[in-house]
Image: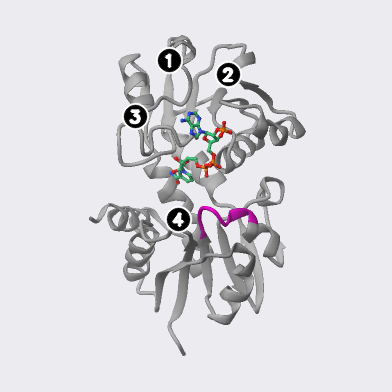
Amino acid sequence: MKKKQFVIFGNPVSHSKSPQMHNAGLKYINFDGEYIKHQLIDGNTIKEVFLQNNYSGANITVPHKEYAYENADEVRGLAKEIKAVNTYINENGKIIAYNTDAPGFLNAIESFGEVKNVLLLGAGGTAKAIALALQSKNIKVTVLNRSEGKLDFFKEHKISCFSWENFKAENYDLIVNSTSAGLKDEELPCPKEILENILKNASFAFDCIYGKITPFLALARDNNLMTKDGEDMLLFQGVLAFEYFTNTKADNSVVEAMRKGLKEE
Ligand code: NDP
């Protein structure tokens, strides 16, 4: 039988660390398969490309998560509400889709201990997954975004949300940066006056960006918060997808093998 192929679809995709993370896991469990990159230009073609190449499973990254949702044969779990998916599996020729970013985020913040009230900065695709993941665990979440435009989704889900102009702060125990501020620039995700005021009363800060101390995490550390970058979120969304791909349960040793793969230069 031909080796199973798994893939990450994105545009661009060359920077993705998913292949090294998944291949480390596949090797560790002696699975006869490989994980490759596939640059996909037109998201509308995702279903035919997936089936034509006979891929067994896929991850989907920017900018195709919504297209992937639209093109799936069946969407399972919280992804039905998020309306964006990052994982495909081929079940007897049918494309089954999941969103593992949402549970991956919940796993990543477990190390903070109990969290009751979260302020989520940003309102993009990642924020949708995080907000609904928190809501599904009955954790209170408030969204704060630079502009009004993307807030409708959160209003529809009865999540309290603000733009910078009309923000009314409360006390939050965890502040999450899900904006792209700090990714390629040295910007804070919201004006410093707002941020300093909320960090003063918070205990934890989480940045979805990984592999660097962003200005947001640096400011949180200056305010003595416990901080974490997005590496574990990336790892755990990958581990959950890996479990779907291989139909196995990843124990701690598999998770650590995948983490090692992720960190390889
Ligand atoms: P989107 O493009 O969907 O959303 C971007 C959001 O950031 C918008 O709300 C936008 O606000 C806001 N924003 C952008 N620039 C600034 C700025 N300079 N100041 C304030 N707000 C800004 O992106 P995604 O949701 O897909 O991704 C967001 C981040 O999460 C990225 O950095 C990405 O790398 C990271 N990520 C990490 C993952 C992980 O596993 N660790 C997984 C997925 C994403 P506006 O509406 O006003 O434009």
Question: Residue 26 placed where, x, y %?
Answer: 37, 69
Label 4 crowd bin: few (<14), some (14–19), many (20+), radius 10 Å: many
Q: Amino acid at mark 4?
A: Gly
Label 2 crowd bin: few (<14), some (14–19), many (20+), radius 10 Å: some
Q: Amino acid at mark 1?
A: Lys
Q: Earlier in the sequence, mark 1 or mark 3?
A: 3
Q: Earlier in the sequence, mark 2 or mark 3?
A: 2
Q: Amino acid at mark 2?
A: Trp
Check contact, mark 2 vs mark 4: CB within 8 A.
Answer: no
Location of the C terminus by quadrant is bottom left
Q: Nearer the viewer, residue 41 or 168?
A: 41
**Horizontal relation, residue 26 to residue 107: left or right:** left
Question: Residue 158 placed where, x, y %?
Answer: 74, 29
Is the residue indicated by label 1 positioned so its CB lies within 8 Å of ligand 1?
no
Place residue 262 in its image quadrant.
Answer: bottom left
| Residues rendered magenta in the picture | 60-66
Q: Nearer the viewer, residue 211 or 242?
A: 211
Q: Earlier in the sequence, mark 2 or mark 4?
A: 2
Is the residue indicated by label 2 positioned so its CB lies within 8 Å of ligand 1?
no
Q: Amino acid at mark 3?
A: Glu
Residue 186: which disc? 3
Q: Earlier in the sequence, mark 1 or mark 2?
A: 2
Mark-to-mark CA distance, 1 and 3? 13 Å
Check contact, mark 1 vs mark 4: CB within 8 A.
Answer: no
The residue to which callout 1 is attached is 192
Mark-to-mark CA distance, 3 and 4? 28 Å
Residue 164: which disc? 2
Q: Residue at x 44, y 58 (%)?
A: 12
Residue 238: which disc? 4
